């Protein structure tokens, strides 16, 4: 399950939760939510490592583009040397060689620029995604903690109210027993 699927599962748990009688709170399976949060924390470093791999791939793409450009330039220079060495067409050879070299350099520059743009886009997207994921995870955990506190406070208030009701009932029972003579007066 990837991080997005884990977020979806947590939202499902919140939607499936049983509404509480007081306030807009919902009772949920805290253990399952905690397990999903723990798994998100474990997966986040993996996805950051993936972003680093993408950055390394960018370097490889640029290196390959530079090698391809160098190979084209060397090939063009060899062709130019061969053409120039044939003295009958020396002038034409120089012109053709220069044209080939110029074209090769233009193609090499274009290849490098495309590779650089592509790798920059990949890195930008990976960084944005990583930041969004961290921000969403932090916000989600804060919301869960706030909801948990509300549920605990509500439970405590219910307990305190019920305890007071039990104490009142005991006093009434004692007073009634004293009136009926079951218990001696104090």
Image: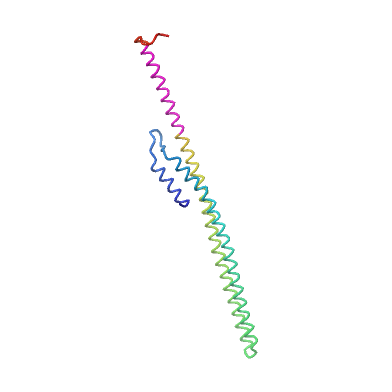
The location of residue 153, given as percent across then percent down, is 46, 32
Side (left or right) of 173 relative to 109: left
Q: In the rendered structure, does residue 172 fall within the stretch colored magenta? A: yes
Q: In the rendered structure, does residue 173 fall within the stretch colored magenta? A: yes
Q: Which residue is drawn at 43% across and 40% down?
A: 29
Side (left or right) of 85 relative to 123: right
Q: Residue at x 43, y 27 (%)?
A: 159
The location of residue 185, given as percent across then percent down, is 40, 8
Q: What stretch is highlighted in magenta?
A: 152-177
Residue at the far front in the pictured view: 182
Q: Quadrant of residue 85?
A: bottom right
Q: In this view, does 2 lie above or below 35?
A: below
Coloring scheme of the render?
rainbow
Q: Is residue 7 above or below residue 173?
A: below
Query: Which residue is nearer to you in this view: 88 or 173?
Result: 173
Q: Which residue is drawn at 60% across and 67% down?
A: 63
Query: Which residue is nearer to you in this view: 23 or 99?
Result: 23
The location of residue 31, given as percent across then percent down, is 45, 41
Q: Is residue 5 above or below residue 58?
A: above
Q: In which quarter of the image is residue 96?
A: bottom right
Q: Residue at x 43, y 47 (%)?
A: 9
Query: Quadrant where the C terminus lies?
Result: top left
């Amino acid at each position: 399950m990837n991080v997005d699927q884990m977020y979806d599962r947590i939202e499902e748990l919140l939607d499936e939760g049983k509404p509480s009688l007081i306030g807009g709170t919902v009772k949920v399976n805290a253990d399952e939510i905690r397990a999903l949060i723990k798994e998100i924390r474990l997966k986040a470093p993996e996805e950051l490592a993936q972003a680093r791999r993408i950055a390394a791939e960018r370097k490889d793409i640029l290196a390959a583009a530079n090698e391809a450009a160098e190979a084209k330039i060397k090939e063009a220079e060899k062709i130019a040397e061969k053409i120039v060495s044939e003295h009958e067409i020396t002038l034409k050879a120089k012109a053709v060689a220069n044209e080939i070299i110029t074209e090769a350099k233009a193609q090499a520059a274009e290849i490098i620029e495309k590779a650089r743009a592509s790798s920059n886009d990949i890195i930008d997207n990976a960084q944005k995604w990583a930041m969004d994921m961290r921000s969403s995870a932090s916000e989600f955990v804060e919301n869960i903690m706030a909801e948990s506190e509300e549920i605990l406070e509500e439970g405590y208030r219910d307990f305190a109210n019920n305890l007071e009701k039990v104490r009142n009932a005991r006093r009434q029972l004692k007073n009634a027993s004293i009136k009926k003579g079951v218990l001696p007066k104090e």
